[in-house]
Image: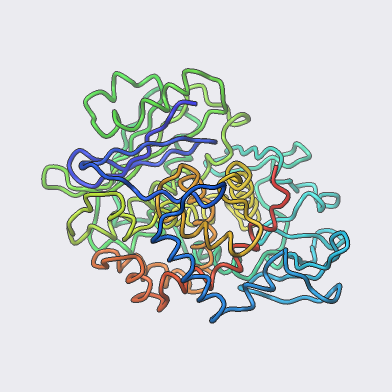
Amino acid sequence: MQKETNQFRLGPGVTTGNVFASRRRHNIKWQSAMAPLIFPVKYGAVVGRSLRRRFCAVSLLLALVEPTIGSAATASNRCSRIGSTKVVSGARFACVKRGKTLVWVVSSKSTVASSSTTIAPGSTTSTTVASVSDSLNFKNRMIYGIKNARLTRRADSGAYFENDSRKAEVFSAIRQKAYSELNPSSLTLSHPSVEFIYDIRPSFPSFLIEFTKRELSASAALWNDFFRTKIQVRVTLATEKDRDYIRGNSWLEMNLPGSLRRFDAKNERPFITGGAGYWDEDGQWRGNIYLATASYLDLTYVNYEWPQVARHEFFHVVQDYAMFRTQRARPSTESEYNRIQPLHFREGGANAVSYLTAFGNLGWSSDAMSWLVWQRASDNRRWIDVKSVDDIFQMMIGTEQRLPNEAFEMSYSIGAVMYEWILGTYGLDGFIKILNQLATAKSFDEALQKSVGLTQNEFYVKSAGYVFSVFQSTWPYR
């Protein structure tokens, strides 16, 4: 598998980007030599001493502060009476019989089928497909189309739909709240504080152009008031046919060649790759975004994450603007950067925003989130096989850093659910308060304390029940 470069700009000559493709591998280059701490949690590997202390501290806090999460919200913990229910961190659990044991599982009553079914805190599973023609099992193919620059989705029946028939009540309270916070009914496409400057290469698929522009405009409109002054954002749309064109642009030359070679090979589903950031060039601060794909892209055969890449990348501009708008010194090492923006916030936070805004309705967003968790958890089980809340804690701590590669991969999925919980608990205002702390905070722990009043460990403990319930709802893994 060709390795991909996933980089972010720390200073002159160092850039940031984000690549969406299944089973990716990424490298990162730094201005100075460093030895990042590796967190291989299982299979006889050595766990860094500081991370072991973190895990012990979180586990102790769990026992002291939220014992109900550690017990009720774990599939391996037994319950005593079939049919009993309880709600933990926004997720409803029911007592059911598995083999000879009574255990807690995520449960809800579906409003689109007569039988009781397990609900992803966002999505019905394959057991609820009989009575709704627009239904889709997220573990099957996730095929999207474009109509009038808006997303459509192909159901398991083969027909395309523009909306989802499920009612909001079938989804968890956390997901309902997070979705509504990011999709206010009053939102328009107006973004006077953001000016886009497009560089669209002739090879870029024409059917994606207006859709991409609309997605970026919608993102800019959502975050318009966050920008204190008007900013420019340069957007490059390119394909594998544009190698000569990108020569001379050090950012694109550093990030794109690996993806372009994969498009040439044609031995996997094509994807949309992206990168973004906000930095000073020749005395002017600008946002920069690139989106690249295969010139031969066919929406019936493409990586399933593609609809949300543009919004994910725009949020990286927001994150960089939040951190560097006062021109604070850029971190010189990856560990220093991750201390302020842990990877599960950098990538997972961007995914929480993009997955909850890019798919057009709550149901499709929920299905896409469920697929993200299921696909990443399935592919990375040899690192951490999530079977309990303790496994969630280990993964939260492990995804603060980039290595091992499984931590990087899982930061997108577990982080998406962690910051969905923030949005569903503290609202968009609370999420923005965290962003506002990045310009001055010495650590993410400090940013959390000054914004939502939680230490980083307390955040992990309080969100763990919900995060585990989302992972549990996608079982079994492949």
Q: Quadrant of residue 86?
A: bottom right
Where residue 226 appears, as percent x and y from the top left, is 32, 63
Q: Is residue 316 above or below residue 178?
A: above
Residue drawn 31% across and 61% down? 340
Give the number of marks.
0
Where residue 133 appears, as percent x and y from the top left, is 80, 47
Q: Quadrant of residue 293?
A: top left
Q: Is residue 9 above or below residue 190?
A: above
Report the side of 125 relative to 463 (left or right). right
Where residue 167 appears, as percent x and y from the top left, is 71, 63
Q: Is residue 279 above or below residue 459?
A: above
Which colouring convention does the figure follow? rainbow
Report the side of 70 relative to 24 (left or right). right
Work out whether residue 213 or residue 280 is closer to the camera in this orientation and state it.
280
- Quarter occupied by the C terminus: top right
Residue drawn 53% across and 36% down? 23
Where residue 227 appears, as percent x and y from the top left, is 28, 61
Report the side of 87 relative to 112 (left or right). left
Given the current orientation, which residue lies at the most extreme left position? 283
Work out whether residue 321 or residue 38 is closer to the camera in this orientation and state it.
38
